[in-house]
Image (cartoon, grey):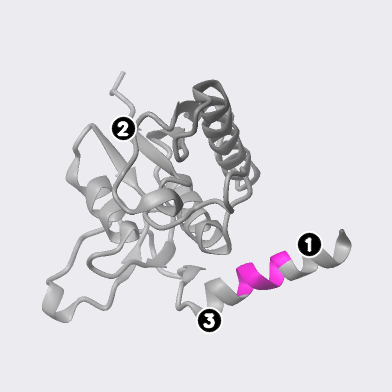
Amino acid sequence: MRILRIVYVLAVVFILIGGGVLISRAVQQPAPAPVPSDTSTDSGLIALPDGATMLAHQGTIGRQLVDWLASGEQTRTFELGGQQFVGRSAEPTPLSIGRLQRLVAMLRSYRDVDITIVGHCDATDDPAADTALGLARAQTVAHDLEAGGIGASRIAVDSRGGSQPIAGGRAANQRISIVLTHHQPT
């Protein structure tokens, strides 16, 4: 089991470093909000309000999240894309682990944003099992967000089981979607 954890950690490190993902603390003053730049000169490096920086190129889910955060729009649902879980399990793929770490960085920086995690799966002849699997996936992600420092009061979970498939076949439906909502001013 210990060897499996070491391999798991090394895979995450490889994805973060080898994949070109950059999450670091900036020494400069925090930016008030991410400001999308002109795509012709876009380096993809985004300054987050807490001083962290993140690489989020045009066309990526990371950039869609950053652009939404800067837009002031109240609520939006995001599909992270790709197979996010190993088969019919609640075990995240290495790629989805890297995405979750970037999501944690953004949510830490934007404390006025709540998240609802909606679990999905490919449909089978047992809708109750599909719903349970979707919920297990959402709870796994919620646990990972909490472990990354996101308060449980900001996180909700839900499941759609196999009732909302997306194009791309079985693998594409081994997923979660996230619903982000800015807090209402009080």
Instruction: Tell me what residue is drawn at x 62 percent, y 44 percent.
Output: 89
The disc labelled 1 sits on which kind of residue? Answer: Arg
Query: Which residue is denoted by mark 3 in the rendering?
Result: 18
Q: How crowded is mark 2: few (under 14 residues within 10 Å), some or many (20 or more)?
A: some
Q: Which mark is residue 5?
A: 1
Front residue (pair 14, 87): 87
How would you classify the magenta stretch by its main secondary structure? helix
Q: Residue 182 carries which label?
A: 2
The disc labelled 2 sits on which kind of residue? Answer: His
Indicate the position of residue 83 as horizontal and vertical percent values. 46, 56
Indicate the position of residue 166 as horizontal and vertical percent values. 31, 44
In the image, which is nearer the foreground, mark 1 or mark 2? 1
In the rendered image of this protein, does residue 131 appear above or below residue 80? above
Q: Residues within 10 Å of mark 1 (few under 14, many from 20)?
A: few
Residue at the farthest top position:
186
* Magenta-drawn stretch contains 59: no
Front residue (pair 96, 76): 96
| Mark with earlier residue (2, 3) | 3
The magenta stretch spans which residues? 8-13
Front residue (pair 23, 64): 64
Instruction: Report the Cα–Cα distance between label 3 and label 1.
Output: 19 Å
Q: Is mark 2 on a helix, strand or loop?
A: strand
